[in-house]
Amino acid sequence: MSDPIAHEGSLPSATQESAEPAPGPAADPATDGKAGPEQAAAKAPSRRRRRGSRGRRRTAEPSAQAPEANPLASGGAEQAGAAQPAAPAPPRPRIGDTRPAPPPPPPLGLPPRPAAADLAELEAGLAGLGAAEQSSEGQAPAQRRRRRPGRSRARERRGRPVGRYLMCVHVQPNASQVAVLEGRSLIEHYLSRPQDSATEIDGNIYLGKVQNVLPGMEAAFVDIGTPKNAVLYRGDVYYDREDVESGSGARPSDVRIEQLLRQGQTILCQVTKNPIGTKGARLTQEVSLPGRFVVLVPNSDTYGISKRLPEDERRRLRRILDAIRPKGHGLIVRTAAEGATAAELGRDVELLVRRWAEIDAMARRTPAPALLYAEPDMAVRVIREEFNANYRGVIIDDRKLYEEVRDYVASITPDLADRVEFYDPETEPLPLFERHHVHEQLHKALDRKVWLPSGGSIIIERTEALTVIDVNTGKNVGRSSLEETVFRNNCEAAEEIARQLRLRDIGGIIVIDFIDMEQKANRDGVMKVFREALARDKTRTQVFEMSELGLVQMTRKRVSEGLVESFSKQCPVCNGRGIVFDESLL
């Protein structure tokens, strides 16, 4: 609106207003009493006062009614037969007016905004054009999923691969780190050091020597050449029933471990769990060799396909496996085999059969204890387990490792070889982890307190027996009710807890203390969100129902020590307790 003082100076005089036609008292009865809201607002006297302008405002009010008078009522039949004159310009807003100001004219050089009818017609035309394009591709428009504008239909956008995940491999002289990103969020992290060769032995195959057999524990300790003896439980012993002396009608579960193993015996075994803390590695005699698409189980009749694959894909892979299955060995098809061709599966099986022949020949001529087969580098192992078409790329900042990974991917999955990229740290302005914001997310993952988007927080505390997670509302005050605020805060916490368990690699017994909710439907809703978030974790979990106190008990398979332990060491002052006693008082 213009300056009020300028409006006062531009108001027309009383003589000029008297020359304009105004509706008289003998107006048409048809229009009497049916004036619109704008006319009623214009006729209403202004209640706002301004010094020096009251009298002039009262004389100027009739002119505001003139443009809105009914032309048929004031003009009669003479104006009805004549051509209609051009519409008068809208009046300028004045002080005291209650009517809204007229819309401003469109800027120069731009077309006026289309009306609602024109917009509807334009949208209908675009919808028809999209339907024609979809029908030309041989698919019904109703069956196709709507895509966001600008979303590419192919697996590439602007010549670059499109995927949900990204893997960054950072190599240092003393350590190697692998970060898996979902979008821009860090969801998994792996750390490997040269000195961890004695502890990171999961998947290695050894020729071990039995040290002692404990019938009371139904286990045996085996020397495999590591600082701590590994443990082999009764259920992981592989044996032939004909070689065991047992009574008639005895069940396999009745065979005791002292009947299967003896002290000083040499056995072929594989590590299934790394040594953690004071516990040694766990062994099994059912050896398996993992490949890119299948897992070879030597000297076994095991046969299976991943349950995560759809039923149609399982039938297709079953037909292929019947043709390429090696004699005397079992096969397990992995989830990564989805969409793999028969040639790719055949190459994978041939590679694993040759590798097992080398291990078997080495076991026959090597004295125990000895290492027969070691898993490849951590980066290669993670890529073998994880890398598929859902990854938009693997970025490595070490030339030697980049060439090794590229050759490995090219030999197994040639279609994905171009997604392995080299990140030159000498020419790039930022390190790899800083470029993709991995460092800052790692620092947050090492903290005991994690903030939620709404202002709440979760606190993660680890003990010797279990891990405790506490959920707090923090700064989240909500809007409608306490129950609704608590429910939304718990839902956010459930998703973040599932992500933190996966990122920090927390295993064992986990107890989660959610905020109390009175309604059972809300408790069930939080558990549904939590289970859906845990479904993306490949590590096996078991979750129990929420109690009346809001406690959730769950277990997660312990694979490694965890993210916090891999980046830390025990404090020599407090010995890991976090407190120091006053020796002068003791």
Image: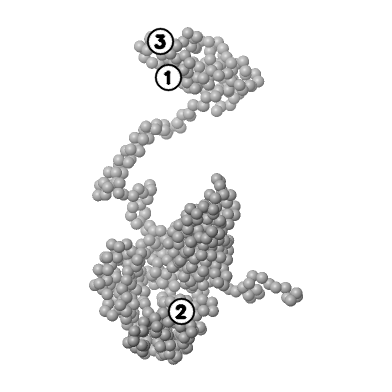
Q: In this view of the protein, can residue 423 be seen by the observer? A: no
Which quarter of the rendered picture does the C terminus lie within? bottom right
Residue 310 lies in what quarter of the image? bottom left
Q: Is residue 516 above or below residue 412?
A: above
Q: In this view of the protein, can residue 154 be seen by the observer? A: yes
Label 2: how many Cα within 10 Å (few below 14, some 14–19, many 20+) = many
- Dot 2 amino acid type: Arg
Please, what secondary structure does the residue beneath circle 2 have? strand
Q: Nearer the viewer, mark 1 or mark 2?
A: 2
Please, what secondary structure does the residue beneath circle 3 have? helix
Q: Is residue 361 above or below residue 38?
A: below
Q: Nearer the viewer, residue 421 or 262?
A: 262
Which of marks 3 and 2 precedes in the sequence?
3
Q: Report x, y in % for residue 54.
A: 62, 18
- Dot 1 amino acid type: Ala
Q: Circle 2 is placed at which residue position?
A: 282
Q: Nearer the viewer, residue 140 or 507?
A: 507
Q: Residue at x 47, y 68 (%)?
A: 556
Q: Nearer the viewer, residue 219 or 477?
A: 219
- Dot 3 amino acid type: Gly
Q: Nearer the viewer, residue 150 or 290?
A: 290
**Label for residue 104?**
none
Q: Circle 1 is placed at which residue position?
A: 87
* Residue 579 left/right relative to 514: right
Q: Report x, y in % for residue 451.
A: 56, 57
* Residue 53 left/right relative to 343: right
Q: Nearer the viewer, mark 2 or mark 3?
A: 2
Please, what secondary structure does the residue beneath circle 1 have? loop
Which of marks 3 and 1 precedes in the sequence?
3
Which of marks 2 and 1 precedes in the sequence?
1
